[in-house]
Amino acid sequence: MKNRVCPLCDSASMATVFAVEDYKESNFTEFAFASRKFPEYMHYRLNLCSRCDVIYASYVPSQEWLINAYEKAEFDSAEEAYFAARTYADFMRFIIPRIPNLQGALDIGTGNGAFLEELLRLGFTKIQGIEPSLAPAKAAKDNIRPLILEKPFQAADFNSESFSLVTCFQTIEHLPEPLTFVKDIHRILKKEGAVFFVFHNHRSVSAKMLGLKSPIFDIEHLQLFSRDSMQLLLHESGFVDVEIRVVYNKYPLRYWIKLMPMPLTVKKKLLILIDAMGIGRVPIIMPAGNLAGIGFKK
Ligand SMILES: [Zn+2]
């Protein structure tokens, strides 16, 4: 474990304690570093930087430890991944008319490659996904798996100006150095290329209502952004025409229940009940406190 300062301004001078640490390493399962799991309500010590409006973990494991944890993480949420990919694909109407062409798209933290299927459907070519966890990549469809690099993102793996689009959904929270990461994305994008993030908004109504019982306060998240901090992150990385938009998530009812702040035993009983009633897979649309952050390279 090591101390950490604000990942945007590289200082702790404007930071206050947001929450004391609340986790037990003995409670880490193979799902602790998985996507769309049952929330465990565990988090590292969290600070809020009032200059940048970022909430960040201020005492964190080493990068090697995290890479190992992600590599071994389980995956059991293919259905939800397809719902999310379809939701995010709707935002492509704001992006496609502005980017130079549809050649070269990189999806970072692609999971089972659900969004790569959307990119294919939209007519993109030279599509690449990257995913550090082995289990989701294994769950990819046969035509998608060859498009997935099974390793953590490293900028050195990609040439400058090689992509028209870089997407990264609910992943920026997990990265130890988000500013360097977004600057790297800027470098590998072509001129007028776009970056498209989906991220958890720590200023959302649901985050305010649920407090530390919001699933966004999670052991996987090394920082949490807001409208202001995402704008700052994109501008400081060189992006222009930054847009922040509300995401209305569409997920099966059973996934919303997974996220609700109630004891795990109650949740599991409720899931059995709604599945028995045949309504567990009914799609429901709600703003879940997620935002889209889109920026363009000049
Ligand atoms: Zn800061």
Image (cartoon, rainbow, N blue to C red):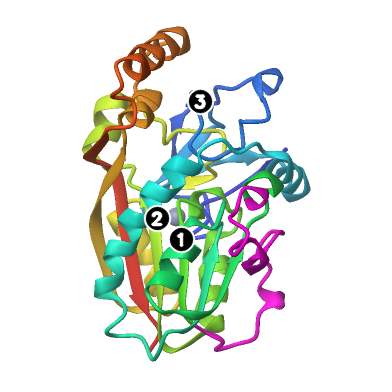
Work out whether 176 lies above or below 40: below
Q: What residue do we see at 72% from left, 50% from top?
A: 63
Q: What residue do we see at 46% from left, 67% from top?
A: 167
Dots 1, 2 in contact, CB < 8 A:
yes
First-in-chain label (1 vs 3): 3
Give, as a three-letter code, the residue at label 1. Answer: Phe
Which residue in the structure is indicated by mark 1?
115
Residue closer to the observer: 182 or 5: 182
Q: Quadrant of the C terminus?
A: bottom left
- Mark in the foreground, 3 or 2: 2
Looking at the rendering, the quadrant in which ligand 1 lies is: bottom left
Q: CA distance from mark 1 to mark 2?
A: 5 Å
Which residue in the structure is indicated by mark 2?
85
Q: Secondary structure at mark 1?
A: helix
First-in-chain label (1 vs 2): 2
- Mark in the foreground, 1 or 3: 1
Q: How many marks?
A: 3
Q: Position of residue 10 (x, y in %)?
A: 54, 59
Q: Position of residue 29 (x, y in %)?
A: 67, 25
Work out whether 111 lies above or below 158: above
Q: Secondary structure at mark 3?
A: loop
Q: CA distance from mark 3 to mark 2?
A: 34 Å
Give, as a three-letter code, the residue at label 3. Answer: Val
Give, as a three-letter code, the residue at label 2. Answer: Ala
Which residue in the structure is indicated by mark 3?
20
**Highlighted range, magenta:** 137-163
Q: CA distance from mark 1 to mark 3?
A: 36 Å
